[in-house]
Image (cartoon, helix red, strand yellow):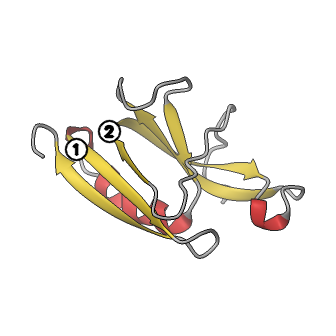
Amino acid sequence: MAELPWLQDPREILDLPDRGSIRLRVKGWVHGRMMIKPKRLGGDEEVEVQALRLQLWEGYKATPPFYYDVTAKTLIYQLMPILQRPDYSMFELGITKYGVAPRARFTVEVTPIGKT
């Protein structure tokens, strides 16, 4: 992971409940790394993880900072092909979580802006 940049604090981990959903529109992103204290390890032990910081358009998050940090590898690898497209900011992403970490899985719905 040494080739990925360190993401600056504050961290804003995207943490959905089982079957929880969120709709996001991304205006910028950074694939990096950070230290976290996973709940599954009791919240005491720090581990280095990959993270995908999703900087959001206005109106997609009520309070600052206006980004989310995704740390679930399965979701990162679903989002990367979408975010690597030159027109990624023209989509709204619907993310739904199924299960709980570390076995949670996600669906990602991609909707062009202006269509429902």
Q: Position of residue 11 (x, y in %)?
A: 66, 38
In the picture, the quarter occupied by the N terminus is bottom right
For the residues labelled 2 and 1, say whether their Cβ atoms are less than 8 Å apart.
Answer: yes
Tag shown at residue 64: none
Spatial CA span between label 2 and label 1 = 6 Å
Identity of the residue drawn at 35% across and 41% down: 24
Pointer 1 residue:
91
Identity of the residue drawn at 88% across and 59% down: 45
Q: Position of residue 59 (x, y in %)?
A: 35, 25
For the residue labelled by badge 1, is the local secondary structure a helix, a strand or a loop?
strand
Q: Is residue 85 left or right of residue 105?
A: left
Residue 13 found in image quarter:
top right
Q: Position of residue 89 (x, y in %)?
A: 26, 38
Q: Quick check: 93 above or below 67? A: below
Mark 1 residue type: Phe
Task: Report the number of numbered marks.
Answer: 2
Pointer 2 residue:
25
**In this view of the protein, can residue 3 be seen by the observer?**
no
Q: Residues within 10 Å of mark 2 (few under 14, many from 20)?
A: many
Q: Residues within 10 Å of mark 1 (few under 14, many from 20)?
A: many
* Sequence-wise first label, 2 or 1: 2
For the residue labelled by badge 2, is the local secondary structure a helix, a strand or a loop?
loop
- Front residue of this view, candidates 76 and 21: 21
In the picture as drawn, the residue positioned furthest to the bottom comes out as 103
